[in-house]
Image (cartoon, grey):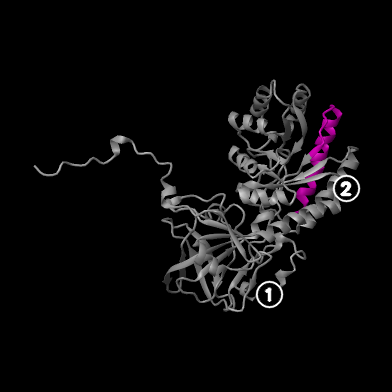
Amino acid sequence: MGQLHALDLAGYSTLNACSVNQQLLPLTAQTNAQGCLEIGGRNVTELVREFGSPLYILDEETLRVACRQYQKAFQRYYPGDFQVLYASKAWSCLAVCALVQQEGCGIDVVSGGELYTALQANVSPAKLYFHGNNKSLQELRFAIESGCTIVADNWLELHSIVELAQGQLRPRIMLRLTPGIECHTHEYIRTGHLDSKFGFDPSQLNEIFTFACHHPSIEWVGIHAHIGSQIFELQPHQDLSVVMTQWLAQASKLGLPFNELNIGGGLGIRYVESDNPPSIETWVKVISESICNACQSQQVPLPKLLCEPGRSLIGSACVTAYTLGSQKVIPQLRTYLAVDGGMSDNPRPITYQSTYRAVVANRMSAPASELVTIAGKHCESGDILLKDILLPQTQPGDILTVLGTGAYNYSMASNYNRLPRPAAVLVRSGEANVILERETYQDLIRQDRLPSRLVPQLLPVGP
Protein backbone atom coordinates (compact mmCIF):
# COMPACT_ATOMS: atom_id res chain seq x y z
CA MET A 1 0.00 0.00 0.00
CA GLY A 2 2.96 2.34 0.49
CA GLN A 3 4.48 2.26 -2.99
CA LEU A 4 2.37 4.90 -4.71
CA HIS A 5 4.84 7.73 -4.13
CA ALA A 6 7.44 5.70 -6.03
CA LEU A 7 5.29 5.56 -9.19
CA ASP A 8 6.92 6.95 -12.30
CA LEU A 9 4.38 9.63 -13.12
CA ALA A 10 6.26 10.52 -16.29
CA GLY A 11 4.75 7.39 -17.79
CA TYR A 12 1.32 8.96 -17.68
CA SER A 13 2.22 11.41 -20.44
CA THR A 14 1.61 8.79 -23.17
CA LEU A 15 -2.12 9.41 -23.01
CA ASN A 16 -3.38 6.84 -25.49
CA ALA A 17 -1.04 3.99 -24.53
CA CYS A 18 -2.95 2.79 -21.47
CA SER A 19 -6.52 1.89 -20.60
CA VAL A 20 -7.98 4.67 -18.47
CA ASN A 21 -9.80 2.30 -16.10
CA GLN A 22 -6.50 0.62 -15.19
CA GLN A 23 -4.84 3.84 -13.99
CA LEU A 24 -4.65 5.00 -10.38
CA LEU A 25 -4.05 8.61 -11.34
CA PRO A 26 -5.48 10.80 -14.10
CA LEU A 27 -3.48 10.47 -17.30
CA THR A 28 -2.02 14.00 -17.09
CA ALA A 29 -0.72 13.54 -13.52
CA GLN A 30 2.92 14.43 -12.94
CA THR A 31 5.22 15.57 -10.18
CA ASN A 32 6.76 19.00 -10.72
CA ALA A 33 10.23 20.22 -9.75
CA GLN A 34 8.95 21.25 -6.32
CA GLY A 35 7.68 17.74 -5.58
CA CYS A 36 4.02 18.72 -5.96
CA LEU A 37 1.29 16.85 -7.82
CA GLU A 38 0.05 18.44 -11.01
CA ILE A 39 -3.08 17.40 -12.93
CA GLY A 40 -4.12 18.94 -16.22
CA GLY A 41 -1.13 21.26 -16.00
CA ARG A 42 -2.27 22.68 -12.66
CA ASN A 43 -0.61 22.32 -9.28
CA VAL A 44 -3.13 20.63 -6.99
CA THR A 45 -1.90 22.60 -3.97
CA GLU A 46 -2.41 25.88 -5.82
CA LEU A 47 -5.88 24.77 -6.93
CA VAL A 48 -6.82 24.32 -3.28
CA ARG A 49 -5.49 27.79 -2.47
CA GLU A 50 -7.62 29.24 -5.28
CA PHE A 51 -10.82 27.23 -4.95
CA GLY A 52 -10.72 25.88 -1.38
CA SER A 53 -11.13 22.34 -0.11
CA PRO A 54 -12.48 19.74 -0.24
CA LEU A 55 -12.19 20.08 -4.00
CA TYR A 56 -13.10 17.68 -6.79
CA ILE A 57 -10.53 18.01 -9.60
CA LEU A 58 -11.71 16.49 -12.88
CA ASP A 59 -9.11 15.95 -15.61
CA GLU A 60 -10.76 16.67 -18.95
CA GLU A 61 -8.15 14.81 -21.00
CA THR A 62 -8.60 11.57 -19.05
CA LEU A 63 -12.36 11.61 -19.50
CA ARG A 64 -12.06 12.34 -23.22
CA VAL A 65 -9.51 9.57 -23.72
CA ALA A 66 -11.76 7.07 -21.93
CA CYS A 67 -14.65 7.96 -24.25
CA ARG A 68 -12.39 7.54 -27.27
CA GLN A 69 -11.06 4.20 -26.05
CA TYR A 70 -14.60 2.79 -25.94
CA GLN A 71 -15.47 4.25 -29.35
CA LYS A 72 -12.30 3.02 -31.04
CA ALA A 73 -12.62 -0.46 -29.53
CA PHE A 74 -16.16 -0.89 -30.85
CA GLN A 75 -15.09 0.39 -34.25
CA ARG A 76 -12.32 -2.22 -34.23
CA TYR A 77 -14.24 -5.25 -32.96
CA TYR A 78 -17.94 -4.81 -33.70
CA PRO A 79 -18.97 -4.88 -37.38
CA GLY A 80 -22.45 -3.51 -36.74
CA ASP A 81 -23.85 -0.22 -35.49
CA PHE A 82 -23.14 0.73 -31.87
CA GLN A 83 -23.68 3.50 -29.32
CA VAL A 84 -21.72 4.14 -26.13
CA LEU A 85 -23.93 5.65 -23.42
CA TYR A 86 -22.44 7.40 -20.38
CA ALA A 87 -24.17 6.16 -17.20
CA SER A 88 -24.68 9.61 -15.74
CA LYS A 89 -25.66 8.38 -12.29
CA ALA A 90 -21.88 8.16 -11.78
CA TRP A 91 -21.70 11.97 -11.98
CA SER A 92 -24.46 14.06 -13.50
CA CYS A 93 -23.81 17.74 -14.13
CA LEU A 94 -24.00 20.04 -17.14
CA ALA A 95 -20.29 20.06 -17.91
CA VAL A 96 -19.84 16.29 -17.79
CA CYS A 97 -22.92 15.68 -19.94
CA ALA A 98 -21.77 18.23 -22.51
CA LEU A 99 -18.23 16.84 -22.58
CA VAL A 100 -19.16 13.20 -23.16
CA GLN A 101 -21.64 14.25 -25.85
CA GLN A 102 -18.81 16.07 -27.64
CA GLU A 103 -16.99 12.72 -27.70
CA GLY A 104 -19.94 11.01 -29.39
CA CYS A 105 -21.47 9.35 -26.35
CA GLY A 106 -25.16 9.22 -25.52
CA ILE A 107 -26.36 9.32 -21.92
CA ASP A 108 -28.15 6.87 -19.65
CA VAL A 109 -30.35 8.64 -17.08
CA VAL A 110 -32.30 7.19 -14.16
CA SER A 111 -34.50 10.07 -13.00
CA GLY A 112 -36.33 13.11 -14.23
CA GLY A 113 -33.56 15.22 -12.74
CA GLU A 114 -30.82 13.43 -14.68
CA LEU A 115 -32.92 13.64 -17.85
CA TYR A 116 -33.45 17.38 -17.31
CA THR A 117 -29.71 17.90 -16.73
CA ALA A 118 -28.79 16.08 -19.94
CA LEU A 119 -31.37 18.01 -21.96
CA GLN A 120 -30.14 21.31 -20.52
CA ALA A 121 -26.63 20.30 -21.65
CA ASN A 122 -28.12 20.05 -25.18
CA VAL A 123 -27.74 16.29 -25.43
CA SER A 124 -29.89 14.98 -28.28
CA PRO A 125 -32.99 13.09 -27.03
CA ALA A 126 -32.17 10.43 -29.65
CA LYS A 127 -29.11 9.60 -27.53
CA LEU A 128 -30.89 9.56 -24.15
CA TYR A 129 -32.05 6.34 -22.49
CA PHE A 130 -34.22 6.57 -19.36
CA HIS A 131 -33.86 3.77 -16.80
CA GLY A 132 -35.34 3.18 -13.34
CA ASN A 133 -37.47 0.66 -11.49
CA ASN A 134 -40.18 3.07 -10.31
CA LYS A 135 -40.55 5.98 -12.71
CA SER A 136 -43.37 8.31 -11.73
CA LEU A 137 -46.14 9.26 -14.13
CA GLN A 138 -44.64 12.74 -14.26
CA GLU A 139 -41.24 11.31 -15.21
CA LEU A 140 -42.76 9.03 -17.86
CA ARG A 141 -44.70 11.93 -19.35
CA PHE A 142 -41.54 14.07 -19.36
CA ALA A 143 -39.59 11.28 -21.07
CA ILE A 144 -42.23 10.70 -23.75
CA GLU A 145 -42.52 14.42 -24.49
CA SER A 146 -38.74 14.81 -24.67
CA GLY A 147 -38.43 12.03 -27.25
CA CYS A 148 -35.88 9.93 -25.39
CA THR A 149 -35.94 6.13 -25.23
CA ILE A 150 -37.58 4.65 -22.13
CA VAL A 151 -36.25 1.39 -20.70
CA ALA A 152 -39.40 -0.20 -19.24
CA ASP A 153 -38.74 -2.07 -16.03
CA ASN A 154 -42.10 -3.53 -14.95
CA TRP A 155 -45.77 -4.05 -15.80
CA LEU A 156 -46.96 -0.86 -14.14
CA GLU A 157 -44.64 1.15 -16.38
CA LEU A 158 -45.77 -0.66 -19.51
CA HIS A 159 -49.44 0.00 -18.81
CA SER A 160 -48.71 3.62 -17.85
CA ILE A 161 -46.70 4.20 -21.04
CA VAL A 162 -49.49 2.80 -23.22
CA GLU A 163 -52.01 5.08 -21.51
CA LEU A 164 -49.80 8.18 -21.67
CA ALA A 165 -48.87 7.60 -25.30
CA GLN A 166 -52.43 7.62 -26.64
CA GLY A 167 -52.77 10.26 -29.34
CA GLN A 168 -49.12 11.29 -29.08
CA LEU A 169 -45.88 10.46 -30.86
CA ARG A 170 -44.89 6.81 -30.64
CA PRO A 171 -42.56 6.43 -27.64
CA ARG A 172 -39.39 4.40 -28.12
CA ILE A 173 -39.37 1.57 -25.57
CA MET A 174 -36.76 -1.00 -24.57
CA LEU A 175 -37.56 -3.87 -22.22
CA ARG A 176 -35.31 -4.57 -19.23
CA LEU A 177 -34.95 -8.22 -18.30
CA THR A 178 -33.11 -9.84 -15.41
CA PRO A 179 -30.65 -12.36 -16.88
CA GLY A 180 -29.99 -14.38 -13.71
CA ILE A 181 -26.21 -14.03 -13.97
CA GLU A 182 -24.11 -13.71 -10.81
CA CYS A 183 -20.83 -11.83 -10.60
CA HIS A 184 -18.37 -11.24 -7.79
CA THR A 185 -19.00 -7.72 -6.60
CA HIS A 186 -20.66 -6.00 -3.64
CA GLU A 187 -24.20 -7.26 -3.07
CA TYR A 188 -25.57 -3.71 -3.28
CA ILE A 189 -24.30 -3.27 -6.83
CA ARG A 190 -25.26 -6.66 -8.27
CA THR A 191 -28.27 -6.23 -10.53
CA GLY A 192 -28.24 -9.21 -12.87
CA HIS A 193 -29.14 -12.05 -10.49
CA LEU A 194 -32.77 -13.13 -10.30
CA ASP A 195 -33.33 -11.76 -6.78
CA SER A 196 -33.10 -8.13 -7.90
CA LYS A 197 -35.48 -5.19 -7.82
CA PHE A 198 -34.63 -4.41 -11.46
CA GLY A 199 -36.25 -5.73 -14.61
CA PHE A 200 -38.78 -8.31 -15.71
CA ASP A 201 -38.24 -11.91 -14.65
CA PRO A 202 -37.25 -14.02 -17.69
CA SER A 203 -40.07 -16.47 -16.87
CA GLN A 204 -42.42 -13.70 -18.09
CA LEU A 205 -40.74 -13.44 -21.48
CA ASN A 206 -43.62 -14.80 -23.56
CA GLU A 207 -46.15 -12.68 -21.74
CA ILE A 208 -44.07 -9.51 -22.19
CA PHE A 209 -43.44 -10.12 -25.88
CA THR A 210 -47.12 -10.91 -26.47
CA PHE A 211 -48.04 -7.62 -24.79
CA ALA A 212 -45.65 -5.81 -27.11
CA CYS A 213 -47.16 -7.50 -30.18
CA HIS A 214 -50.61 -6.29 -29.12
CA HIS A 215 -49.51 -2.64 -28.82
CA PRO A 216 -48.13 -1.54 -32.20
CA SER A 217 -48.65 2.11 -31.21
CA ILE A 218 -45.41 1.72 -29.23
CA GLU A 219 -42.05 1.64 -31.02
CA TRP A 220 -40.49 -1.45 -29.44
CA VAL A 221 -36.78 -1.06 -30.12
CA GLY A 222 -34.96 -3.72 -28.13
CA ILE A 223 -33.85 -5.40 -24.93
CA HIS A 224 -31.71 -4.26 -22.00
CA ALA A 225 -29.94 -6.15 -19.21
CA HIS A 226 -27.27 -5.23 -16.69
CA ILE A 227 -25.35 -7.50 -14.31
CA GLY A 228 -23.78 -5.06 -11.85
CA SER A 229 -20.84 -2.75 -11.41
CA GLN A 230 -17.12 -2.72 -10.51
CA ILE A 231 -16.79 -6.11 -12.23
CA PHE A 232 -13.39 -7.58 -13.10
CA GLU A 233 -14.64 -10.86 -14.59
CA LEU A 234 -15.25 -11.33 -18.30
CA GLN A 235 -17.17 -14.61 -18.28
CA PRO A 236 -20.42 -13.09 -16.91
CA HIS A 237 -20.47 -10.66 -19.83
CA GLN A 238 -19.96 -13.53 -22.29
CA ASP A 239 -22.83 -15.40 -20.64
CA LEU A 240 -24.98 -12.27 -20.84
CA SER A 241 -24.35 -11.97 -24.57
CA VAL A 242 -25.59 -15.52 -25.16
CA VAL A 243 -28.71 -15.08 -23.03
CA MET A 244 -29.68 -11.75 -24.58
CA THR A 245 -29.20 -13.02 -28.13
CA GLN A 246 -31.53 -15.91 -27.36
CA TRP A 247 -34.12 -13.35 -26.26
CA LEU A 248 -33.64 -11.49 -29.53
CA ALA A 249 -34.24 -14.70 -31.48
CA GLN A 250 -37.42 -15.38 -29.52
CA ALA A 251 -38.70 -11.86 -30.19
CA SER A 252 -37.90 -12.22 -33.88
CA LYS A 253 -40.01 -15.37 -34.14
CA LEU A 254 -42.97 -13.39 -32.80
CA GLY A 255 -42.46 -10.66 -35.38
CA LEU A 256 -41.14 -8.02 -32.96
CA PRO A 257 -38.75 -5.73 -34.83
CA PHE A 258 -36.15 -5.43 -32.08
CA ASN A 259 -32.94 -3.95 -33.48
CA GLU A 260 -31.14 -2.73 -30.36
CA LEU A 261 -29.36 -4.72 -27.66
CA ASN A 262 -28.20 -2.90 -24.54
CA ILE A 263 -25.74 -4.97 -22.49
CA GLY A 264 -25.40 -2.45 -19.66
CA GLY A 265 -22.00 -1.57 -18.23
CA GLY A 266 -20.19 -2.63 -15.10
CA LEU A 267 -16.49 -2.67 -16.05
CA GLY A 268 -14.45 -1.95 -12.92
CA ILE A 269 -11.57 0.44 -12.33
CA ARG A 270 -8.34 0.32 -10.38
CA TYR A 271 -8.83 1.93 -6.96
CA VAL A 272 -5.73 0.40 -5.30
CA GLU A 273 -2.56 -1.25 -6.57
CA SER A 274 -3.90 -4.76 -6.11
CA ASP A 275 -6.92 -4.15 -8.37
CA ASN A 276 -6.53 -5.64 -11.86
CA PRO A 277 -9.55 -4.86 -14.04
CA PRO A 278 -9.63 -5.85 -17.72
CA SER A 279 -8.83 -3.02 -20.11
CA ILE A 280 -11.60 -1.18 -21.94
CA GLU A 281 -10.43 -2.70 -25.20
CA THR A 282 -10.44 -6.25 -23.78
CA TRP A 283 -13.95 -5.78 -22.39
CA VAL A 284 -15.28 -4.45 -25.69
CA LYS A 285 -13.54 -7.22 -27.65
CA VAL A 286 -15.07 -9.96 -25.49
CA ILE A 287 -18.55 -8.40 -25.69
CA SER A 288 -18.37 -7.83 -29.45
CA GLU A 289 -17.09 -11.29 -30.32
CA SER A 290 -19.63 -12.94 -28.00
CA ILE A 291 -22.53 -11.05 -29.57
CA CYS A 292 -21.33 -11.81 -33.11
CA ASN A 293 -20.93 -15.53 -32.36
CA ALA A 294 -24.27 -15.75 -30.57
CA CYS A 295 -26.11 -13.95 -33.38
CA GLN A 296 -24.61 -16.30 -35.92
CA SER A 297 -25.62 -19.30 -33.80
CA GLN A 298 -29.18 -17.99 -33.37
CA GLN A 299 -29.39 -16.85 -36.99
CA VAL A 300 -30.43 -13.32 -36.15
CA PRO A 301 -28.97 -10.14 -37.69
CA LEU A 302 -26.48 -8.12 -35.70
CA PRO A 303 -28.35 -5.58 -33.57
CA LYS A 304 -27.30 -2.05 -32.82
CA LEU A 305 -25.13 -2.70 -29.75
CA LEU A 306 -25.35 -0.34 -26.79
CA CYS A 307 -23.35 -0.28 -23.56
CA GLU A 308 -23.50 1.97 -20.52
CA PRO A 309 -20.10 2.60 -18.89
CA GLY A 310 -20.08 5.06 -16.03
CA ARG A 311 -17.34 4.37 -13.49
CA SER A 312 -14.87 3.19 -16.16
CA LEU A 313 -15.31 6.47 -18.05
CA ILE A 314 -15.07 8.98 -15.22
CA GLY A 315 -13.85 7.24 -12.06
CA SER A 316 -10.11 7.56 -12.70
CA ALA A 317 -10.43 11.04 -14.20
CA CYS A 318 -11.07 12.78 -10.87
CA VAL A 319 -9.31 13.22 -7.54
CA THR A 320 -10.52 14.86 -4.35
CA ALA A 321 -8.16 17.24 -2.55
CA TYR A 322 -8.53 17.77 1.20
CA THR A 323 -6.64 19.87 3.74
CA LEU A 324 -5.19 17.89 6.64
CA GLY A 325 -6.15 19.13 10.11
CA SER A 326 -5.97 17.54 13.53
CA GLN A 327 -4.04 14.41 14.46
CA LYS A 328 -4.74 11.83 17.16
CA VAL A 329 -2.06 9.33 18.13
CA ILE A 330 -3.11 6.25 20.06
CA PRO A 331 0.22 4.66 21.09
CA GLN A 332 0.81 1.19 19.64
CA LEU A 333 -2.65 1.19 18.07
CA ARG A 334 -3.44 3.86 15.46
CA THR A 335 -2.73 7.37 14.23
CA TYR A 336 -5.70 9.33 12.93
CA LEU A 337 -5.30 12.22 10.50
CA ALA A 338 -8.44 14.31 10.03
CA VAL A 339 -9.45 16.05 6.81
CA ASP A 340 -11.93 18.83 6.14
CA GLY A 341 -14.46 16.55 4.46
CA GLY A 342 -15.45 12.91 4.70
CA MET A 343 -18.59 10.87 4.28
CA SER A 344 -20.62 13.82 2.97
CA ASP A 345 -18.39 14.17 -0.10
CA ASN A 346 -17.49 10.45 -0.35
CA PRO A 347 -20.07 8.10 1.19
CA ARG A 348 -18.68 5.00 -0.57
CA PRO A 349 -16.34 3.78 2.19
CA ILE A 350 -19.08 3.77 4.83
CA THR A 351 -21.69 2.44 2.37
CA TYR A 352 -19.76 -0.17 0.37
CA GLN A 353 -16.58 -0.55 2.45
CA SER A 354 -14.78 0.84 -0.60
CA THR A 355 -11.01 1.29 -0.59
CA TYR A 356 -8.95 4.08 -2.15
CA ARG A 357 -5.37 5.27 -2.57
CA ALA A 358 -4.17 8.68 -1.55
CA VAL A 359 -1.10 10.86 -1.94
CA VAL A 360 0.05 14.04 -0.23
CA ALA A 361 -0.01 16.49 -3.12
CA ASN A 362 2.69 18.79 -1.70
CA ARG A 363 5.01 15.93 -0.67
CA MET A 364 5.07 13.66 -3.72
CA SER A 365 8.83 13.05 -3.51
CA ALA A 366 8.84 12.19 0.19
CA PRO A 367 9.04 8.53 1.28
CA ALA A 368 5.87 6.90 2.56
CA SER A 369 6.91 6.13 6.13
CA GLU A 370 3.90 6.53 8.44
CA LEU A 371 0.93 4.18 8.82
CA VAL A 372 -2.15 6.34 9.32
CA THR A 373 -5.93 6.27 9.10
CA ILE A 374 -7.73 9.17 7.40
CA ALA A 375 -10.82 10.29 9.30
CA GLY A 376 -13.53 12.64 8.11
CA LYS A 377 -14.82 15.53 10.20
CA HIS A 378 -18.37 14.28 10.64
CA CYS A 379 -19.91 13.34 13.96
CA GLU A 380 -19.88 9.66 13.06
CA SER A 381 -17.38 7.01 14.21
CA GLY A 382 -17.67 5.26 10.87
CA ASP A 383 -16.57 8.34 8.96
CA ILE A 384 -13.27 6.83 7.86
CA LEU A 385 -12.08 7.48 4.31
CA LEU A 386 -8.92 5.35 4.30
CA LYS A 387 -7.78 2.89 6.93
CA ASP A 388 -4.15 1.97 7.65
CA ILE A 389 -2.40 3.52 4.66
CA LEU A 390 1.25 4.53 4.32
CA LEU A 391 1.89 8.23 3.78
CA PRO A 392 4.89 10.55 4.18
CA GLN A 393 5.25 12.44 7.42
CA THR A 394 2.61 15.16 7.33
CA GLN A 395 1.59 18.28 9.15
CA PRO A 396 -1.65 20.29 9.36
CA GLY A 397 -2.25 22.19 6.14
CA ASP A 398 -0.83 19.51 3.85
CA ILE A 399 -3.03 18.55 0.89
CA LEU A 400 -4.22 14.95 1.00
CA THR A 401 -5.44 13.85 -2.42
CA VAL A 402 -7.66 10.78 -2.77
CA LEU A 403 -7.53 9.13 -6.17
CA GLY A 404 -10.29 7.64 -8.32
CA THR A 405 -13.17 9.75 -6.98
CA GLY A 406 -14.98 10.58 -10.22
CA ALA A 407 -17.74 8.00 -9.86
CA TYR A 408 -20.46 8.11 -7.20
CA ASN A 409 -18.72 10.72 -5.06
CA TYR A 410 -20.29 14.04 -5.98
CA SER A 411 -23.42 12.28 -7.20
CA MET A 412 -23.93 10.64 -3.79
CA ALA A 413 -22.72 13.63 -1.75
CA SER A 414 -24.93 14.97 1.01
CA ASN A 415 -25.19 17.81 3.50
CA TYR A 416 -24.78 15.55 6.52
CA ASN A 417 -23.96 17.68 9.58
CA ARG A 418 -24.95 20.59 7.34
CA LEU A 419 -21.64 20.62 5.51
CA PRO A 420 -21.82 22.47 2.19
CA ARG A 421 -20.99 20.27 -0.78
CA PRO A 422 -17.56 20.91 -2.34
CA ALA A 423 -16.74 22.74 -5.53
CA ALA A 424 -15.59 20.91 -8.66
CA VAL A 425 -13.13 22.18 -11.24
CA LEU A 426 -12.38 20.91 -14.74
CA VAL A 427 -8.68 21.13 -15.58
CA ARG A 428 -6.98 21.02 -18.96
CA SER A 429 -3.71 22.39 -20.35
CA GLY A 430 -3.10 24.62 -17.35
CA GLU A 431 -6.65 26.02 -17.26
CA ALA A 432 -9.14 25.39 -14.44
CA ASN A 433 -12.86 26.06 -14.79
CA VAL A 434 -15.41 25.76 -12.01
CA ILE A 435 -18.13 23.33 -13.11
CA LEU A 436 -19.86 23.11 -9.73
CA GLU A 437 -19.87 26.01 -7.31
CA ARG A 438 -19.07 25.38 -3.66
CA GLU A 439 -22.25 25.49 -1.60
CA THR A 440 -22.59 28.21 1.03
CA TYR A 441 -24.31 28.23 4.40
CA GLN A 442 -27.07 30.24 2.73
CA ASP A 443 -27.52 27.40 0.23
CA LEU A 444 -28.05 25.02 3.14
CA ILE A 445 -31.13 26.88 4.38
CA ARG A 446 -32.43 27.97 0.96
CA GLN A 447 -35.27 25.41 1.04
CA ASP A 448 -35.97 25.78 4.77
CA ARG A 449 -39.26 27.32 5.84
CA LEU A 450 -39.96 28.68 9.32
CA PRO A 451 -43.62 28.70 10.40
CA SER A 452 -44.64 32.10 11.75
CA ARG A 453 -45.48 30.68 15.17
CA LEU A 454 -41.83 29.66 15.53
CA VAL A 455 -40.41 33.07 14.65
CA PRO A 456 -38.96 34.58 17.84
CA GLN A 457 -41.10 37.40 19.20
CA LEU A 458 -39.51 40.57 20.54
CA LEU A 459 -40.25 40.99 24.22
CA PRO A 460 -41.41 44.40 25.45
CA VAL A 461 -38.59 46.48 26.96
CA GLY A 462 -39.05 48.32 30.26
CA PRO A 463 -42.10 48.67 32.53
Q: Quadrant of residue 257?
A: top right
Q: For the magenta stretch, what is the residue range?
A: 233-260
Residue 423 spot, x, y in % from top left: 52, 56
Distance, label 1 to label 2, CA atoms, is 38 Å
Can residue 183 be seen? no
At mark 1, the secondary structure is loop
Residue 310 spot, x, y in % from top left: 67, 50
Neighbourhood count class around disc 2 (C-alpha, 10 Å): few under 14, some 14–19, many 20 upward: few
Q: Quadrant of residue 273?
A: bottom right
Neighbourhood count class around disc 1 (C-alpha, 10 Å): few under 14, some 14–19, many 20 upward: few
- Residue position marked by numbered label 2 in the rendering: 79
The amino acid type found where label 2 is placed reads Pro
- Residue position marked by numbered label 1 in the rendering: 8
Quarter the C terminus occupies: top left
Residue 115 spot, x, y in % from top left: 63, 40
Residue 220 spot, x, y in % from top left: 77, 30
Left or right side of 152 for 355 = left
Left or right side of 11 for 43 = left
User: In this view, which residue lies farthest toward the left?
Assistant: 463
